[in-house]
Image (spheres, rainbow, N blue to C red):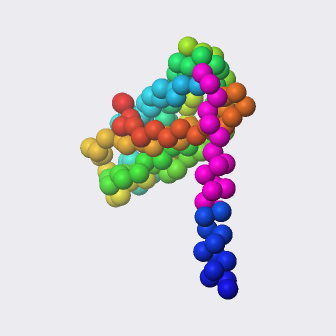
Amino acid sequence: MRRQFALLSLPLLLAIGCSSNPKPPAGYVRPEVLVRGPGPIFFGSGTTAPVTIDVQIANSGSMPITVRRVRIESPGMSQYSLAPTTREYRETIASGQMAMVSMSATAYASRARLDPTEPLLIRAVVELESGGVWIREVYTIRAER
């Protein structure tokens, strides 16, 4: 009986989950995102180093957007990686304008005294609000130095 209930309720749960993603409002255009990396990372004799990541967001749409949250992480890195970092914002970007937000993170090396040669790959998850609708955009970027 439980198994039949679970099998019958699965399509209903999937339908509810799929219908909860609102459509972006008319005039919304996916913003352009540029991530500037920290430059050379110096680990010294340890395995951690502080880094600052700048995230530039350009609004080319016809309506303003509000940046609510930015999360950065570095998936698939082998020599070093960034600790996942999330920061809340309330930065409104008018149509045709851009804004820059800075984030502090910690880099973790695979071994002490690492001099990294691997380029930093960053996944940035930017949560925006436009026309009363929350939108999540995911960008995977090789950070510029």
User: Looking at the figure, which quarter contains the N terminus?
Assistant: bottom right
Report whether residue 91 is seen.
no
Query: Image quadrant of residue 59?
Result: top right
Residue drawn at (56%, 13%) of the image: 96
Query: Of 2 and 110, which appears nearest the observer?
Result: 2
Which x, y percent locates residue 71? 56, 43
Using the image, determine if residue 104 lies above or below residue 97. below
Residue drawn at (66%, 48%) of the image: 20
Q: Residue furthest top?
A: 96
User: Looking at the figure, which quarter contains the C terminus?
Assistant: top left
Residue drawn at (48%, 29%) of the image: 33
Which x, y percent locates residue 82? 46, 48
| Magenta region | 13-27
Using the image, determine if residue 131 lies above or below residue 11. above
**Horizontal side of residue 3 vs 145, given as left or right:** right
Which x, y percent locates residue 93? 62, 21
Numbered disc total: 0
Residue drawn at (60%, 16%) of the image: 62
Q: Residue furthest left?
A: 117
Please say whether residue 112 is one of the residues in the magenta stretch: no
Report whether residue 17 is seen.
yes
Q: Residue furthest bottom?
A: 1
Please say whether residue 15 is one of the residues in the magenta stretch: yes
Query: Of 35 and 118, which appears nearest the observer?
Result: 35
Which x, y percent locates residue 66? 66, 28
